[in-house]
Amino acid sequence: MPDHELHPLPPQPDGVAWPTDAWPIGSPPPALEAVVDEMFADEARYGATYAVAVVQGGRLLHERYGGALPHFDRPPEPVEPGTPLLSWSMAKSVLHATVGTLVGDGVLQLDAPAGAPGWDDGRAAITLDHLLQMREGLAWAEDYVDAGVSDVIEMLFGAGKDDVAAFAEARPLLHPPGTVFNYSSGTSNIVAAMVGRAVGPGDAARQYVLERVLHPIGMRSADPRLDAAGTFVGSSYVYATAQDWARFGTLYLRDGTWGGARILPEGWVDHGRRLRSVDDTDGSLYGAHWWIDQLDVERGTFRASGYDGQMVGICPPLDAIVVRLGSTPQELLPNLPPWRKRILDTLG
């Protein structure tokens, strides 16, 4: 496993207001705008881009919007600053924050058994921390193309869509817990069901996510979605504007604090960004419901990442956040990490 330094998380700079209501504005370096323009202009390389926002030192340096969201029942919707955009798997990092509040309150314990219904076999040894690290050992195929083999497609759009947690909890044990990394959206929904059992299902769970994590940091556009069983679909479904996704990045960049208040327990951000696993399929680096950038390990950049190229990249040494939301085909996704690194390189 490669070395991975946990760089110190910078405090909010003196004299810079927290962006709870509005973002302080900064001046972007000239090179930054050119790299952002490239993302929107070169669809052959990056696919469609809806929004980019770049923050450094607590100030919004640059934001840009473009394209239109397709709809089946109405004309395409032009993307504007107030347009809520879908997280896809960035929701997993929101789920990590939600779990952090419950761990900090002593309601959930990382090393305690997950206790999913029916887990009276080898799955009884699976802990919450195994699930957060995606090392729980359950059989799962996270395939976004072949519906015939994909568990995630079946969970979100097929037989599992009305009760995503029950679908995932029914997977058999394939490896001893804690031994093998396997990225799984089903695993996140098992965690989301644990949240629901702790705070109440349905609207109680949704309000908990909003009131304990998202609204205190000004994410007023945030819209976590539930399935028919009342489980927060923590694998995939949170809508928010680009500026609000930058607020979420700021929460983690500021070590889980906001405006002098502690939202997440001390050390919880480190729990997410500490390197635990290397994906054998492509060398990707994973912490606990957060990814670590392969191309920027030396700066300790970590990110929330979602299908089609959604991302909130966080670079502690540069005190910077890069948000990009759009629709990038799978074959073009390898072009996004170098672009993100180039954005950060313009900042220092």
Image: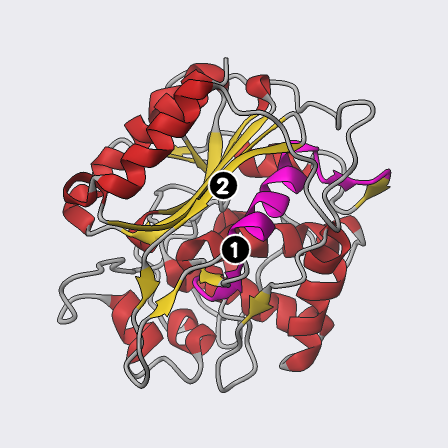
12 up-or-down from 22: above or below: above
- The residue at the point 34 percent across, 28 percent down is 35
252, 100: nearer the viewer: 252
Question: On the picture, is 26 further left or further right than 331?
Answer: right
Q: Is residue 119 in view? A: yes
Characterize the local packing of mark 1: few (<14), some (14-19) or many (20 or more) Cα atoms within 10 angstroms: some
What number of labels is visible?
A: 2
323 up-or-down from 215: above or below: above
Quadrant of the rendered image containing residue 94: bottom right
Question: On the picture, is 54 further left or further right than 69?
Answer: right
Cβ–Cβ below 8 Å for labels 2 and 1? yes
- The residue at the point 22 percent across, 48 percent down is 47
298 up-or-down from 78: above or below: above
Q: Is residue 247 magenta?
A: yes
Q: Which residue is mark 2?
A: 63
314, 6: nearer the viewer: 314
| Percent of width and height locating residue 106 | 79, 54
- The residue at the point 74 percent across, 45 percent down is 264
Q: Which mark is residue 182?
A: none
Quadrant assignment for the N terminus: top left
195 up-or-down from 175: above or below: below
* Circle 1: element type: loop
Question: On the picture, is 207 further left or further right than 347?
Answer: right
Q: Which mark is residue 81?
A: 1
